[in-house]
Image (tube, rainbow, N blue to C red):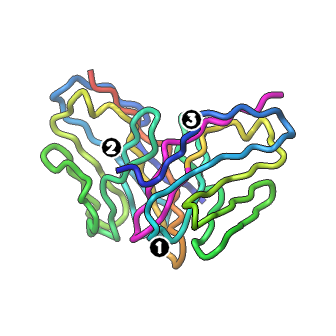
Amino acid sequence: DQQVKQNSPSLSVQEGRISILNCDYTNSMFDYFLWYKKYPAEGPTFLISISSIKDKNEDGRFTVFLNKSAKHLSLHIVPSQPGDSAVYFCAAYNDYKLSFGAGTTVTVRA
Amino acid sequence: EAGVVQSPRYKIIEKKQPVAFWCNPISGHNTLYWYLQNLGQGPELLIRYENEEAVDDSQLPKDRFSAERLKGVDSTLKIQPAELGDSAVYLCASSARTSGADTQYFGPGTRLTVL
């Protein structure tokens, strides 16, 4: 039962432009949502989170938007940089448990 | 501050052999997790420890998998015997269990290949 879905396995974007990553979830009991970034041969690293009572959280170049009615969240990266090339995982938190999506591979082109 | 340490980083074994993975969490983190990550998928929780107690092992295949965290710090995950389908990356994570979102910090993982 996949409760968190990232339907785009990959995204290619030009350096300096905006990257938009999408995530959908099914469980309305999730109370936090997180994005993790993963480089090859490394573990996922925490990027940004948002509480279910918020609709936006911003941290530097990264902004996460939450639409609870649509059970949808997105991560915006502006501007995209070559170091942003990685796999991004959407995760949802409830009852001490994180549920992860399958990830989106972002490639930033020079 | 040192991150989550895992060893070995890579392991190749033949099916039916035993294998063990070791994890040292971030100092002061009481909560420790073991995840399984198959290729092209996100991490899936196997077991969660609060100090030395396994508080959620509902996803751990107990017929062949076992884990321990004897002194509430380091942890070991064991598979005996390994099967071909166990080939995956095994991730360890830890958190400080503060209020709000459970920000988990991951180690680099152990990539297991079962031949």
Q: Nearer the viewer, residue B39 or A31?
A: A31
Q: What residue is shown with label 2?
A: B21
Q: Is residue B43 left or right of residue A86?
A: left
Q: Assign a secondary structure to mark 2.
A: strand
Q: Residue at x 62, y 67 (%)?
A: A50
Q: The disc numbered 3 marks a residue on which chain? A: A
Q: Residue B57: image x %, image y %?
A: 25, 59
**Mark 2 Cα within 10 Å, few/some/many (few <14, many 20+)?**
many
Q: Is residue B43 left or right of residue A79?
A: left
Q: What residue is shown with label 1?
A: B97
Q: Residue B59: image x %, image y %?
A: 26, 54
- Badge 1 or badge 2: first in the primary sequence: 2
Image quadrant in which the C terminus of chain A is located: top right
Q: Nearer the viewer, residue A56 or A96?
A: A56
Q: Is residue A50 above or below residue B100?
A: above
A8 falls in the magenta region: no
Q: Assign a secondary structure to mark 3.
A: loop
Q: Nearer the viewer, residue A39 or A3?
A: A3
Q: What residue is shown with label 3?
A: A9
Prevalent SS, magenta region: strand
Residue segment shown in magenta? A90-110
What is the spatial separation of the Cα atoms under label 1 and label 2, in whole angstroms?
23 Å
